[in-house]
Image: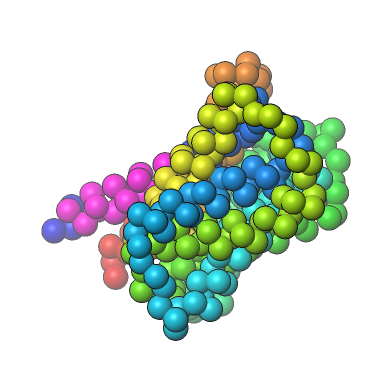
Amino acid sequence: MFAAYANRLWFNIMVTAMAPMIWGSTYIVTTEFLPPSRPFTAALLRALPAGLALIAFCRVLPQRADSGRLLILSVLNIGAFQALLFVAAYRLPGGLAAVVAAMGPLLMMAVTWGMDRVKPSVWAVLAGMLGIVGMGALLFSPSMKWDWLGGLAALAGTLFMTLGTFLTKRWKLNLPVLALTGWQLLLGGLMLAPFAYFVDAPLPVLSTMQLSAYAYLCVAGALLAYALWFRGVVRLPSVAVTSLGLLSPLTAVVLGWVFLGQSLSTLSWLGFSLVLGSVFAVQWFNARVSASQ
């Protein structure tokens, strides 16, 4: 009985882990194949068509009583998070942004402790801190310059996504996972539309490769990845899900090393190992807690 539960738990962890790994490919697709300097357009074209496709497929309307909560989740998980993410990306070096984002597991532990009175174990906190140290060793450079607005945007974006993940699990809206994903992508995409229109330059005539890149970000980066992510949010502890988000920058680093020839120092590989160890440790601690309940 216990073995079956453990196998199901780790299967859900591995399925959920696919979402941040897909998101990790966003960087190389954006920098190598998309028109430059149009971040909000990319976010809009990633979210909105995927939301429309999922809603058309599911044909499930949210209950009126859930509409307010659904709107809040759409702001936290898609609209505000994507906007703040791109503000941070433009004002901070990628390494600093990733280090700030690595605070997600610790923030989730704090939110869970404050809202549900579930005190994290010392080992889980240490594992979360290990992830921040590892991310710093992997991506941080002495030449990087700090920008306070970019730092606040990165921290706010991480906090918003943390709250969105926590509230998605707590509220348990009466929607199937695919419909829940679709409505959040649709509403969040609509929130991004003004930024794409007023901030970004108009799109040029797109090549076949650029169209394919936008399609990949929509189908894989939004439709598939967010469906897997929210599936995991429903089935796994919130801290465990947030910790898996660290796999996104790890994937980006590996893809840059394999396809772009980006070099990694010994310190970088040490940081990579620390972050991976942190993710596994958080999953293991939460699996033990779930099994004992």
Q: Is residue 229 above or below residue 116?
A: above
**Which residue is nearer to you in this view: 212 or 39?**
212
Q: Is residue 41 magenta?
A: no
- Most distant residue in the top direction: 261
For the point 42% across and 42% down, the residue is 18
For the point 29% across and 70% down, the residue is 293
For the point 44% across and 81% down, the residue is 64
**How has the structure been colored for display?**
rainbow
Predominant SS of the magenta segment: helix
**Residue 283, percent across and down?**
41, 52
Q: Is residue 285 above or below residue 214?
A: below
| Left or right: where 293 falls relative to 196 | left
**Which residue is nearer to you in this view: 196 or 248?**
196
**Residue 220, percent across and down?**
46, 40
Q: Is residue 223 above or below residue 235?
A: above
Q: Quadrant of residue 269?
A: top right
| Residue 156 in view in this figure | yes
| Left or right: where 293 falls relative to 221 | left
**Which residue is nearer to you in this view: 130 or 264?**
264
Q: Quadrant of residue 254?
A: top right
Q: Is residue 13 magenta?
A: yes
**Residue 202, percent across and down?**
75, 40
Stretch of the chain drawn in magenta: 4-19
| Left or right: where 87 falls relative to 188 | right
**Residue 105, percent across and down?**
55, 57
Q: Quadrant of residue 41?
A: top right
Count of marks placed on residues: 0
Looking at the rendered image, the quarter that the N terminus falls into is bottom left
- Most distant residue in the left direction: 1
| Left or right: where 18 falls relative to 202 | left
For the point 64% across and 42% down, the residue is 42
